[in-house]
Image (cartoon, grey):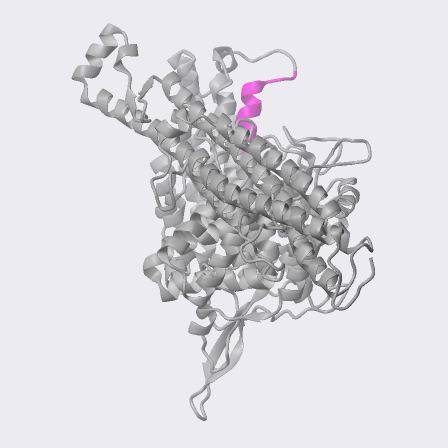
């Protein structure tokens, strides 16, 4: 059709307009239906009744018919199909007439623009309908899973003897008791209290499970509210269909969290914003889609600014709301751990590749080519770009000693954030981040010289006194990161494993090459009285993270956590770390016994307490265990006796550390003595093996070694009454199996033997000669310390019913056993003196 005048309205145009009117009317009807049905899905099919309304109760969680959600999802998918048919019809019969040449001219051009808007709307309607269907199915899956956990909590309570009401209240079920027990329950207040306490515990478990459903339901509401919003203001419509609709609930929640973070940063966040931020992070911090979406939106720069603002608010600007800000901080930290998590990798043979193994690095590089891996690589690169940039933080500014602005660096703020969460970061991320931080500070770094003073600030941010010093701030980010790494023992082991060149180099760097002095010290100018930089000093919590990471690396567990059964058995890699740490610090402290950093001594004692049998073998010194022909039990630790002696002497500068090691060895000795039977004490065995003599000999040498080391330490401190008193104080405070190590307390059958070897008698040995010389201390220990071992042997002999007259016979079998113990005790003293440089 040719154009005449302003255009010709032919049959095709008229037909197109009629079809357009039909389609537009149909689209308008669908649009109204979509809005109405979205509301139904949001407020009827979701568990929550209304915006700001009551949260789902236990009863509603258990009784709601979740199958309605799948039915609704089916309807939305069907609707998408109907919109597709409309699109096809419209594209052919309406939009098509403006592009097939049958209609030309200005009117055709104008109509084409109008028709394209409608065509895009029909396409957007399909996108939105499919997205809603996906969101509803996602909600169904979440609710089914979470309700299953509520049901499991209920079942656990019932199995534990509880009764659970229809509303989720838990009571101790007395009907399950036998008549006699029910009668006892009715008349015993303590029994009733224990029943109520158990019921309260299970009710809390059910409440937590219901709370998880509530959190998920809130996320569904956010997604369903957002998915129907037309976010494109340039698509030619007002409040049209959403062409950018997303199919993940977590992506909408992350978008909402990003908006809230902006309001928190600007100071305009409401109490409801803070509550929603807590919920959003609590519910989703373990979800990778949510976590990566949120961090992508914030970026490393925005993440650092956000965490700094949360700290400003928590510790300086709004202390009353501290708990809320710290909860958000913890959720953000866990989100970071999830977003950067590296999945289980496999080597070329299909076997699980552990970090530090030969195939791990290859598998990691291959994984980085995936979508998940590309996020990781991009984020790490952006972290490096922001790690040494300056950011505003009130804590650093508030503690200036000079007039110069004192900013926080990106790495300091990032590690501060990581310390808040309870999630374990993946080993690859921890290693990459540690390498990046080291590159910034190491003046001898292979790629480019770093700045050893880069972290220096005008204040001691002491984590051991955080309330008064803002010690929550990781002013030394590398030490702080090692503390975070200690929560991932496998990563810690790989980081320090000397079987690799990097592991050996890492340990050497932290021991002897790193500049640990991160605190600027100032003097006063005599000329004008102004502050003048005088040099650098150690922070009060220096090496705390390093010590924790070494303990985790050599023991395979997080410091302070409960030790599992078999805690004394370790992997070859963990044992290699122990060997290297003992040998290296033995050499470092050969001249200066105080050269082992103060804040790692307890960690080193805790580590040795995980190897009681091996340490006992080495200290007893029958052979050179660094010789491949000899093995300690059970871990084959290749360390010389003199090396172990020097290492023990170095950690013994801390009285509590010495007590931990001393009592762990007494526990092991008690276990050995407890294996002896009556015949061992009354009859000399035939052949070359004599268990009683062997145990007495080895135990005597170990106890002699430890008493000499204690005497040497106290003797060195005799010129400082405060130093000796402090040593005694912490010695008394720490006891074997205390929470500081998390080691299991030994059984009751051995406790009496341990009490004989330690307890008040051992503690008084430290105080008996307050200002004694080393010689006087040793004389005192030989007189009063050695009898502890003979008393342990005598006690075991009585327990197995050895005749009293044979126990007391100094010339019989028991006399030989005690004589062997005494001779070895003296040998232990001499061995320790030689190793620690006290002879000659």
Left or right of 18 on screen, residue 282: left
- The span shown in magenta is 688-701
Of residue 518 and residue 827, the one placed in the foreground of this image is 518
How many dots with numbers?
0
The answer to which image quadrant residue 150 occupies is top left
In the rendered image, residue 696 lying in the magenta stretch gets the answer yes
Q: Position of residue 260 (x, y in %)?
A: 47, 57
In the rendered image, residue 648 lying in the magenta stretch gets the answer no
Work out which quarter of the rendered image holds the N terminus and state it.
bottom right
Of residue 658 and residue 795, the one placed in the foreground of this image is 658
The answer to which image quadrant residue 9 occupies is bottom right
Which residue sits at x=41%, y=20%? 155
| Most distant residue in the left direction | 187
| Most distant residue in the bottom direction | 527
Which residue sits at x=54%, y=72%? 536
Query: Relative to 678, is 663 above or below?
Result: below
Query: Relative to 584, is 62 above or below?
Result: above
Which residue sits at x=38%, y=45%? 51
The chief SS type of the magenta part is helix
Query: Relative to 554, is 598 above or below?
Result: below
Of residue 245 and residue 443, the one placed in the foreground of this image is 245
Query: Relative to 734, is 205 above or below?
Result: above
Q: Position of residue 323 (x, y in %)?
A: 37, 53
Q: Is residue 166 visible?
A: yes
| Most distant residue in the top direction | 179
Q: Is residue 741 visible?
A: no
Q: Position of residue 143 (x, y in %)?
A: 49, 32
Q: Position of residue 222 (x, y in %)?
A: 48, 46
């Amino acid at each position: 059709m040719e154009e005449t005048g302003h255009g010709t309205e032919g049959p095709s145009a008229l037909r197109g307009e009629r079809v357009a009117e039909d389609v537009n009317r149909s689209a308008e009807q669908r649009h109204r239906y979509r809005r109405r049905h979205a509301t139904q899905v949001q407020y009827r099919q979701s568990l929550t009744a209304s915006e700001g309304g009551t949260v789902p109760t236990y009863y509603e969680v258990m009784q709601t018919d979740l199958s309605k959600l799948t039915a609704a999802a089916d309807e939305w998918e069907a609707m998408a199909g109907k919109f597709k048919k409309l699109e096809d019809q419209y594209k052919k019969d309406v939009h098509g007439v403006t592009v097939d040449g049958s209609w030309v001219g200005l009117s055709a051009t104008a109509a084409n623009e109008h028709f394209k808007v409608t065509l895009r709307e029909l396409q957007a309607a399909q996108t939105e309908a499919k997205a809603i269907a996906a969101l509803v199915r996602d909600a169904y899956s979440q609710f089914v899973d979470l309700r299953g956990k509520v049901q499991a909590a209920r079942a656990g309570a019932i199995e534990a003897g509880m009764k659970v009401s229809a509303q989720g209240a838990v009571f101790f079920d007395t009907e399950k008791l036998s008549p006699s027990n029910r009668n006892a329950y009715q008349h015993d207040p303590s029994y009733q209290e224990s029943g109520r306490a158990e019921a309260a515990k299970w009710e809390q478990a059910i409440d937590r499970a219901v709370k998880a459903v509530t959190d998920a339901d809130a996320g569904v509401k956010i997604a369903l509210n957002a998915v129907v919003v037309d976010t494109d203001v340039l698509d030619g419509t007002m409040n049209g269909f959403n062409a950018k609709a997303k199919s993940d609930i977590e992506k909408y929640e992350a978008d909402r969290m990003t908006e809230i973070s902006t309001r928190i940063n600007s100071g305009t966040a409401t109490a409801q914003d803070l509550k929603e931020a807590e919920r959003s992070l609590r519910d989703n911090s373990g979800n990778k889609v949510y976590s990566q979406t949120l961090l992508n939106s914030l970026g490393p720069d925005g993440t650092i600014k956000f965490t700094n603002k949360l700290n400003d608010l928590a510790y300086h600007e709004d202390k009353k709301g501290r708990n809320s800000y710290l909860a958000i901080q913890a959720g953000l930290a866990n989100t970071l751990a999830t977003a950067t998590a590296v999945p289980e990798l496999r080597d070329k043979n299909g076997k699980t590749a552990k970090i530090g193994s030969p195939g791990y690095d290859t598998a990691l590089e291959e994984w980085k080519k995936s979508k998940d891996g590309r996020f990781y690589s991009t984020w790490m690169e952006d972290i490096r770009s922001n790690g040494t940039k300056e950011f505003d933080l009130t804590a650093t500014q508030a503690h200036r000693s000079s007039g110069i602005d004192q900013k926080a660096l990106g790495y300091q703020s990032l590690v501060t954030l990581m310390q808040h969460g309870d999630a374990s970061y993946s080993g690859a991320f921890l290693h990459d981040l540690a390498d990046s931080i080291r590159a910034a500070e190491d003046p001898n770094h292979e790629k480019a010289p770093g700045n050893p003073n880069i972290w220096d600030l005008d204040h001691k941010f002491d984590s051991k006194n955080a309330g008064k010093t803002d010690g929550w701030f990781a002013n030394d980010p590398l030490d702080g990161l090692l503390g975070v790494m200690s929560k991932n023992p496998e990563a810690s082991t790989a980081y320090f494993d000397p079987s690799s060149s990097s592991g050996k180099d890492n340990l050497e760097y932290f021991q002897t090459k790193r500049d640990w002095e991160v605190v600027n010290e100032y003097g006063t100018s005599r000329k004008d009285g102004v502050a003048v930089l005088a040099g650098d000093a150690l922070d009060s919590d220096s090496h705390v993270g390093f010590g924790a990471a070494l303990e985790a690396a050599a023991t395979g567990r997080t410091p302070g956590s409960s030790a599992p059964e078999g805690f004394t058995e370790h992997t070859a890699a963990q044992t290699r770390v122990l060997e290297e740490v003992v040998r290296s610090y033995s050499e470092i402290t050969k001249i200066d016994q105080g050269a082992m950093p103060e804040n790692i001594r307890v960690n080193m004692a805790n580590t040795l307490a995980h190897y009681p049998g091996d340490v006992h073998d080495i200290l007893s010194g029958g052979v050179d265990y660094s010789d491949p022909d000899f093995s300690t039990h059970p871990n084959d630790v290749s360390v010389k006796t003199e090396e172990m002696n020097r290492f023990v002497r170095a950690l013994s500068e801390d009285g509590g550390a010495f007590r931990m090691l001393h009592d762990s060895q007494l526990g092991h000795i008690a276990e050995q003595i407890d294996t002896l039977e009556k015949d061992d004490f009354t009859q000399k065995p035939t052949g070359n093996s004599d268990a009683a003599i062997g145990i007495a000999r080895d135990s005597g040498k170990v106890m002699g070694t430890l008493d000499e080391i204690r005497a040497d330490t106290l003797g060195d401190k005799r010129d400082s009454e405060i130093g000796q008193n402090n040593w005694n104080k912490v010695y008394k405070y720490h006891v074997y199996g205390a929470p500081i190590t998390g080691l299991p307390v030994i059984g009751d059958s051995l406790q009496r033997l341990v009490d004989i070897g330690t307890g008040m008698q051992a503690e008084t040995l430290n105080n008996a000669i307050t200002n004694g010389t080393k010689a006087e201390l040793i004389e005192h220990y030989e007189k009063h310390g050695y009898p502890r071992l003979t008393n342990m042997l005598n006690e075991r002999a009585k327990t197995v019913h050895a005749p009293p007259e044979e126990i007391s016979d100094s010339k019989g079998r028991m006399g030989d056993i005690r004589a062997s113990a005494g001779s070895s005790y003296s040998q232990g003293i001499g061995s320790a003196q030689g190793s620690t440089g006290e002879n000659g």
